[in-house]
């Protein structure tokens, strides 16, 4: 009899089921819809040259962008904080996304990455004033269904030396194009034989992963970081809200790797995967060792209903 071997193939929280249609999608670039092979920005663009820009990830459900208002609040607040003038209203941004989705025949099971940079620079140097022609706006909308394998078996995390920094260095609440901090963390995790990184805060408490917000479940309680050093995730906030409304004890608090290793369940939150289970942390099996536990499954069901309600409210509001 052959002994089953553990599933050790690499994966990420953003793995999606293969979809051949994505090879021919149209991408929005500064007012034009172009085939993905012709979608280009200048090498002088501040986003390419310096990582000077902000982005949002959104999912399309039944013709509506879930939690659109919350995503726009985060985008516009971030751009304001770095004096990046978008030159569009949230309604105009929605029109761009709707136009791009429609051009690709999408009404659901689609994911958008909206990118806004400070735009093309007059010279290849850092000063923001060299971006003289206004922002660059790009929207990539792909046919996208999260991988059943990842959602079923979970992600393997490794704690890494790269930390999420202090707000006065580069505030981790920015969803910025400057992601090198997280890329380094992901590389460190891969070198440790894991899929993605579990990052600590400057005090050594568990914080977030390189790509998503992080939660654990201990004795029926849901724990996540204080939020001081992590991305202010829209899905993170929604999970905290729905736990409170459903009477599930939820705490934003400092906790250590010791408590994470002993968790009954762990999961990641993000717009793409919603709630992705964690199978291992630093080689320690979490809970039953893969797949979503009972609390995570309950949160998934509550979140699915929350998405449906938000989509219905948007449809009603927009007539």
Image (cartoon, grey):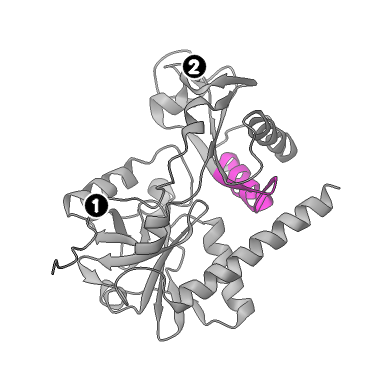
Q: Relative to 17, say whether 30 is above or below.
A: above
Q: Tell me if residue 318 can be seen.
A: yes
Left or right position of 315 against 168: right
Report x, y in % for residue 30.
61, 22
Name of the residue lying farthest toward the front = 1
Report the residue at 59% width, 44% height from top.
75
Report x, y in % for residue 261.
27, 74
The quadrant holding residue 247 is bottom right
Q: Relative to 260, say whether 198 is above or below.
A: above
Q: Which mark is residue 9?
A: 1
Quick check: is 110 in the magenta stretch? no
Report the residue at 71% width, 62% height from top.
309
Report the residue at 24% width, 59% height from top.
7
Report the residue at 28% width, 60% height from top.
157
* Closer to the camera in the image, 41 or 127: 41
* Closer to the camera in the image, 21 or 74: 21
* Closer to the camera in the image, 174 or 132: 174
Q: Tell me if residue 229 can be seen.
A: no
Please provide the residue range marked out in magenta.
57-80
Mark toward the start of the polypeptide (1 vs 2):
1
Q: Relative to 182, say whether 308 is above or below.
A: below
Q: Which residue is disc 2 drawn over?
A: 38
Quick check: is 61 in the magenta stretch? yes
């Amino acid at each position: 009899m052959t002994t089953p071997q553990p599933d050790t193939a690499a994966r990420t929280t953003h793995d999606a089921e293969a979809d051949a249609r994505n090879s021919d999608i149209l991408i929005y670039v500064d007012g034009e819809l172009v085939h993905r092979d012709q979608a280009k920005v200048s090498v002088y663009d501040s986003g390419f040259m310096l990582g000077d820009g902000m982005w949002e990830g959104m999912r399309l459900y039944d013709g509506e962008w879930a939690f659109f208002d919350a995503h726009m609040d985060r985008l516009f607040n971030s751009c304001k904080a770095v004096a990046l003038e978008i030159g569009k209203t949230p309604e105009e941004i929605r029109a761009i996304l709707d136009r791009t989705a429609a051009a690709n025949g999408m009404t659901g099971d689609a994911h958008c990455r909206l990118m806004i940079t400070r735009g093309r620079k007059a010279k290849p140097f850092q000063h923001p004033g060299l971006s003289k022609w206004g922002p660059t706006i790009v929207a990539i909308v792909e046919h996208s269904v999260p991988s059943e394998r990842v959602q079923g078996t979970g992600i393997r995390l490794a704690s890494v030396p790269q930390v999420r920094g202090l707000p006065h260095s580069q505030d981790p609440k920015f969803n910025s194009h400057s992601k090198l901090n997280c890329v380094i963390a992901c590389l460190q995790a891969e070198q440790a034989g894991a899929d993605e990184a579990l990052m600590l805060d400057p005090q050594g408490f568990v914080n977030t992963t390189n790509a998503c917000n992080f939660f654990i479940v201990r004795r029926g309680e849901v724990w996540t970081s204080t939020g001081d050093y992590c991305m202010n995730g829209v899905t993170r906030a929604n999970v905290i809200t729905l736990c409170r409304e459903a009477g599930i004890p939820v705490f934003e608090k400092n906790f250590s790797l010791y408590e994470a290793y002993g968790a009954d369940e762990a999961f990641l939150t993000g717009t793409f995967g919603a709630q992705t289970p964690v199978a291992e942390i630093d080689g320690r099996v979490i809970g039953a060792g893969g797949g979503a536990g009972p609390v995570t499954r309950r949160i998934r069901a509550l979140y699915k209903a929350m998405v449906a309600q938000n989509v219905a409210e948007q449809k009603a509001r927009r007539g």
